[in-house]
């Protein structure tokens, strides 16, 4: 593993441009709902998130999607979720044992309109990486990326804040037909973490390799999806088997044109 100081030396915004934040309108403004990651399988494009985020959006005809890093000229991208989107979800269970995983399929015209702003991760490439016999390097850092609701302000100009939380995976668990990671954010005397990670639900769990053994550029691996915060501040995430086996296979089964 590497420490936070080393991480800041190579960090860039490739992860943030893969991230989406969901907002639903309400009287007097909006409410942040959760986070997701832009992904695709073949011609099927969508947002990887958790089931309870999709449930929170299910009563809406239109929502707004924020693309990070949020720019002044495109703070919100409107999306007609009722008429133009479809989804797959497992759960939500309402507890830390899951399942709580989802995929929101996006219409191609919407994807085309934002393609210059985002970096969508290939789940096919991710599946190959997830079950490779060797990792790119023995030096890595693990992070959870997500929106922080308490830092997102309905001000003018609008402020939407995301956090790249450095930490470690303390435990790996298998529950029924899905796997879970228990992620523990690393404490830092120079940084005050949020009092709650509300808003991070659906955000990506990433492993980053700054110095791959083959001498190539920094390697980024999407290895899970955050969905639950424990009482002691740890974050429960679905792992690679949940994303790259159960959900991956369900996407291909529901939409055969993904092949």
Image: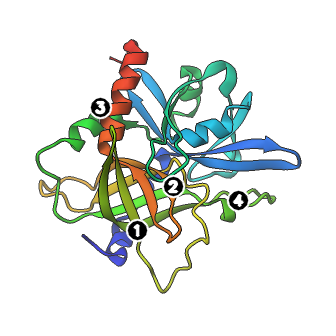
Q: Earlier in the sequence, mark 3 or mark 1?
A: 3
Vertical side of 50 occupied by 184: above or below: below
- Mark 4 to mark 1 CA distance (whole Å): 27 Å
* Foreground tag (4 vs 1): 1
**Do the residues under discs 2 and 4 have CB atoms within 8 angstroms?**
no
Q: Earlier in the sequence, mark 3 or mark 2?
A: 3
The residue that mark 4 highlights is 159
* Foreground tag (3 vs 4): 3
Which circle marks residue 124 in the picture?
A: 3
**Do the residues under discs 3 and 2 have CB atoms within 8 angstroms?**
no
Task: Count neighbours of disc 1 (C-alpha within 10 A) and say few if under 14, some if 14 to 19, many if 20 or more.
Answer: many
The residue that mark 2 highlights is 228
Q: Earlier in the sequence, mark 4 or mark 1?
A: 4
Element type where label 2 sits in the image: strand
Task: Count neighbours of disc 3 (C-alpha within 10 A) and say few if under 14, some if 14 to 19, many if 20 or more.
Answer: some
Q: Give the x, y percent position of residue 195.
A: 61, 72
């Amino acid at each position: 593993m590497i420490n936070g100081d080393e991480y800041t030396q190579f960090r860039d915004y490739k992860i943030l441009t893969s991230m989406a934040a969901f907002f639903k309108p309400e009287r007097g403004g909006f409410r942040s709902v959760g986070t997701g990651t832009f992904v695709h399988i073949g011609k099927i494009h969508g947002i990887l998130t958790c089931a309870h985020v999709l449930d929170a959006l299910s009563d809406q005809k239109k929502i707004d999607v924020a693309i990070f890093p949020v720019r002044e000229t495109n703070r919100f991208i409107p999306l007609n979720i009722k008429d133009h989107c479809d989804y797959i979800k497992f759960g939500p269970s309402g507890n830390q044992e899951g399942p709580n995983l989802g995929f929101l399929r996006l219409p191609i015209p919407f994807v085309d309109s934002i393609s210059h702003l985002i970096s969508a991760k290939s789940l096919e490439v991710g599946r190959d990486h997830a079950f490779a016999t060797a990792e790119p390097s023995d030096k890595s850092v693990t992070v959870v990326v997500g929106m922080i609701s308490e830092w997102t302000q309905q001000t003018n100009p609008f402020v939407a804040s995301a956090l790249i939380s450095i930490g470690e995976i303390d435990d790996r668990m298998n529950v029924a037909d899905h796997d879970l990671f228990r992620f523990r954010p690393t404490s830092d005397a120079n940084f005050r973490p949020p009092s709650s990670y509300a808003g991070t639900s659906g955000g990506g769990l990433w492993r980053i390799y700054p110095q791959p053994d083959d001498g190539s550029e920094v390697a980024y691996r999407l290895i899970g999806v955050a969905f639950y915060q424990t009482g002691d501040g740890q974050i429960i995430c679905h792992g690679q088997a949940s994303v790259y086996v159960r959900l991956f296979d369900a996407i291909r089964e529901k939409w055969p044109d993904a092949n």
